[in-house]
Image: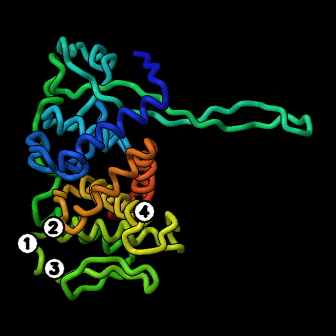
Amino acid sequence: MKNTTPKADIYTRITNQIITALETGVRPWVKPWHSDHAAGRITRPLRHNGEPYSGINILSLWSSASVQGFTSPIWMTFKQSKELKAKVRKGEKGSLVVYANKITRTEENENGDEVERAIPFLKGYTVFNVEQIEGLPERFYEKPEPRFNPVQRIDHAEAFFKDTGADIRHGGNRAFYAIHPNYVQMPPFEAFRDAESYYATLAHEVTHWTRHPSRLNREFGRKTYGDEGYAKEELVAELGAAFLCADLEITLEARDDHASYIASWLKALKDDKRAIFQAAAYAQRAVDFLHSLRKPEEKAA
């Protein structure tokens, strides 16, 4: 089903969706809904073939699921539902996702030579949650068992963060990343109300850890505590933690000490409709980098 949504409208629609959620006090990347389908755990939104979405599409579909009350993480296009001999229920409203790519164009430079120029483009298309579709094979409606029992799942998270090689220190009552000495500081494990809270907080700080010049060299022009660049980095870390928690099957809850950034995020998103796309892209890059550090036997598990 062809979609001719203009690029500017794609940025505006998705950004406005997230702005609306933030203005009501809901962060779309923090679990604001009940996820029965995934046995009580958050997962990344999934395509009909089980492939997870990435970047801005995670935020867009999490937000849409929250607003419409969906518990299933699985989405597909109208055409894909037809191919499965199913039918989108009449009156159902689809959700916007985007596809980014580049086309190559041959142009003539100032010397009269032909050169190839890559032109990025963004295409929007519509998907429907399986709860909006009738007649799909039963596997799309089944509630899967968790991949790990609580002990195994936490062991899995422990191994993931160990593989990063980050210098993680414990003590005190603050969680932060110190860039110049290059270490992550965490309160003692026992100080957290449960294991998931510990690993979710660690995911946030280790996302910050990726900004070091020796890794992804992410800056945003930060000069002082609490400035615009600082708020942008906090947004990237929040999204990175959300993506990681989905991958590790850990429930992410809002941290009270980050609530003060919402006003800054709202201003940034209202001023620049591409800001949330950029933040999601930086977060995805950080998460991909962290996954790349996993040991081969962990990747195969």
> Mark 1 highlights which residue?
193
Q: Nearer the viewer, mark 3 or mark 1?
A: 1
> Mark 3 highlights which residue?
189
Separation of disc 2 and disc 4 at Cα? 27 Å
Disc 4 vs disc 3: Cβ atoms closer than 8 Å? no
In this view, the residue in front, 43 or 144, is 43
Q: Residue furthest right?
A: 111
Disc 2 vs disc 1: Cβ atoms closer than 8 Å? yes
> Mark 2 highlights which residue?
197
> Which quadrant holds residue 155?
bottom left
* Three-letter code for the amino acid on which mark 2 is drawn: Ser
Mark 3, secondary structure of its residue: helix
Query: Which mark is first along the chain, 2 or 3?
Result: 3
Q: Position of residue 113 (x, y in %)?
A: 89, 36
The residue shown at (17%, 62%) is: 153
On residue 115, which mark appears?
A: none
Query: Along the horizontal axis of the image, is 299 left or right of 121?
Result: left
Note whether 264 is above or below 224 in the view shown: above
Disc 2 vs disc 4: Cβ atoms closer than 8 Å? no
The residue shown at (11%, 39%) is: 37
Separation of disc 2 and disc 1 at Cα? 7 Å
In this view, the residue in front, 250 or 186, is 186
Note whether 4 is above or below 63 in the view shown: above
Q: How is the image coloured?
A: rainbow
Q: Position of residue 131 (x, y in %)?
A: 15, 26
